[in-house]
Image (spheres, grey):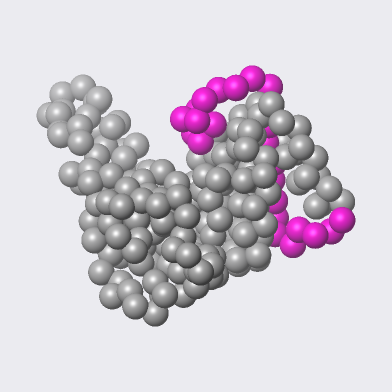
Amino acid sequence: MQPAAEIGARRGEVVVCIPLYAGHEHFVSCLRSVLRHTPLEVRVLICDDASPDPRSREHVHELQRQGAVRHELYYTCRERNAGFPANVNGAFASAAPADLVVLNSDCVVAERWLEGLRPAAYSASAVATATALTNHGTIVSVPERWAPARRLPEGWSLEDAAGAVRRTSLCLRPRLPTAVGHCVYTSAAARWNWWAALTWRSAPGTARRSTSPSAAWPTASAT
């Protein structure tokens, strides 16, 4: 499948994108967790940015040959490395007009991860993105904000940590100054509003608005 090719997603649906470049072992763990904990109706899009490790593509093809993938799974591969922004822009084009979650390939997700993100993204009409809590994510780190840790507390599994968050969260969904890129949900409506605002600014004879997207389209944290 060619980069930026449409996958037939519809408005109101969600597509999970995993940008890929090297890090094969991390990718295998990430994909396993996504396929295990993501609703079957959600499409999964892997965007290979000319990764130097062919094992990742071979792994996906082997899973498909074995019939181990129940999701609609798409794999795009660039001939040359384009960089993360261009690779993700291709994912937005492929997923349109659906919502898109960009999940780094060195992340793993737990049960009901997407069910927590989507309500945060739609918690207010002005919210553009929602960022998942994580053990290593600066302002969205848990259990201590601004105290990212490469590993979970001793004796804790990912399921333990995710379950503790679900049980104790107040679902406040605070506004953040920026999204944190490990796992970001972006609504199609927000992308459309941003495009319309840029178009309006550039139209002849119109006044110029503020160019700060965070002023009009803030990001929330999913809890």
The image shows residue 185 at horizontal and vertical percentages of: 43, 53
Q: Residue furthest bottom?
A: 167
In magenta segment, residue 82:
yes
- Name the residue at 54% across, 60% down: 109
The image shows residue 162 at horizontal and vertical percentages of: 46, 69
- Name the residue at 33% across, 74% down: 169
Q: Is residue 35 visible?
A: yes
Q: Residue furthest left?
A: 207
Q: Quadrant of the N terminus?
A: top right
Q: Residue furthest front?
A: 154
Q: Which residues are magenta?
A: 66-89
Rendered position, 14 above or below 84: below
Q: Is residue 97 visible?
A: no
The image shows residue 43 at horizontal and vertical percentages of: 62, 55
Rendered position, 10 above or below 19: below
The foreground one among 127 and 220 is 220
- Does 71 sit left or right of 104 as displayed? right
The foreground one among 46 and 157 is 157
The quadrant where residue 39 appears: bottom right
- Name the residue at 52% across, 25% down: 83
- Name the residue at 62% across, 59% down: 33
The foreground one among 124 and 185 is 185
Q: Quadrant of the C terminus?
A: bottom left
